[in-house]
Image (cartoon, rainbow, N blue to C red):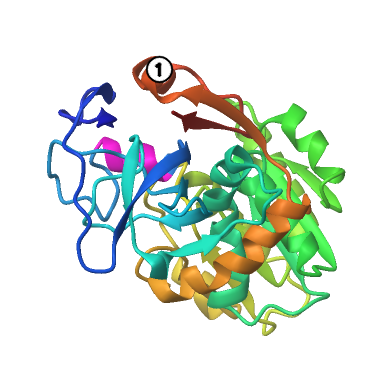
Amino acid sequence: MLAAVVRSFDRPPRYEEFPTPRPDGDRVLVDVLAAGLHPRVRSGADGTHYTSEGRLPMVPGVDAVGRLPDGRRVYFVADDGAPGTFAGQALLDPRRAVALPEDADPVVVAAAANPAMSSWVALRRRIDFRPGQSVLVLGATGNAGQMAVQIARHLGAGRIVAAGRDPRRLDLLTALGATDLVSLAEDPDSPASAAAADERLGAAAADVDVVIDYTWGAPAQRAIPAIVTRRADRARPLHWIQIGSTAGPEIALPSAALRAADLRVLGSGQGSVTTAGIVAELPSLIEQLSVGTLTVDARPRPLAEVEKAWKEPVEPGSRTVFVP
């Protein structure tokens, strides 16, 4: 079969021949209709994801919309030990799949399911989120952050604070459900500019119940004390759900931040949520994607152009989807 193949972690995948995987056990071979180029896919393809085992060659791709031998279309999450979904065909475990409604757009589902799943699972599986609670989305101007704003609204958040650096993308989030916008843009050479950004975030998000954090790194390191020190009731739980690390993999966390407030830092991702738990959330999420409750800017590209597309900059808020 033809597939995107990674033979070096230092180079983009190339479109070439690769052995077709063989069905085994309960797994069946499906035709791939659409597969999204998510940050998780990129980190797997360059060997930096925390689940990477360093094995090459490999076919990237963690999920896809596929067609079963009987013609039915499904969205599925690929097995960790199987070749990825950036290929003409892929192995599907029925326990990791959900049928698509007839009117579902495969490209939209492939673009949105992975980034939407991050906050969907975080709010439904990692904490006891209740309608009326308030949410801060840190890193809201990216694709997953944009989804998180919509999902928080759908799940009944009473207030949604969206914080990000891209002013143009930030302004669009009000229409998607954000009640407060906070610009994190600053002059890197001006301490006063950084302090002003911290002040804006602390004032807007002091009393939120949940933080969905896609940045980690310096933004989270500064945001934690900025928010904690301004809380009206520091004994009120603040769930800080760490999902992405676009700004860096580490922070320095002052011990006082943990003692001075009921700050509960936890992660949400592979390992902290079981595969069964993630798959259990798929039907309800796919339903919302199918009816248009959640929107995404999907950009389809032929899989044959994978090497070229891999190198091209991606507009914030959009998602490349490879199709046959």
Amino acid type assigned to the residue bearing label 1 in the image: Glu
State the quadrant of the C terminus.
Answer: top left
Drawn side of residue 127 relative to residue 162, left or right? left
At numbered mark 1, what does the secondary structure look like: helix, strand or loop? helix
Magenta region, residue range: 40-46
Main secondary structure of the magenta stretch: helix
Picture layout, residue 321 above or below residue 122:
above
Q: Position of residue 77 (x, y in %)?
A: 41, 57
- Does residue 232 show up? yes
Front-most of residues 167 and 253: 167
User: Toward which corner of the image does residue 260 lie, by quadrant?
Assistant: bottom right
> Looking at this view, is 58 or 122 the one in front?
58
Q: Residue at x 66, y 39 (%)?
A: 141
Q: Which residue is mark 1?
A: 305
At x 33%, y 41%, the residue is 89
**Along the line of sight, the residue nearer the viewer: 174 or 185:** 174
Q: Residue at x 56, y 65 (%)?
A: 282
x, y percent for residue 258: 51, 75
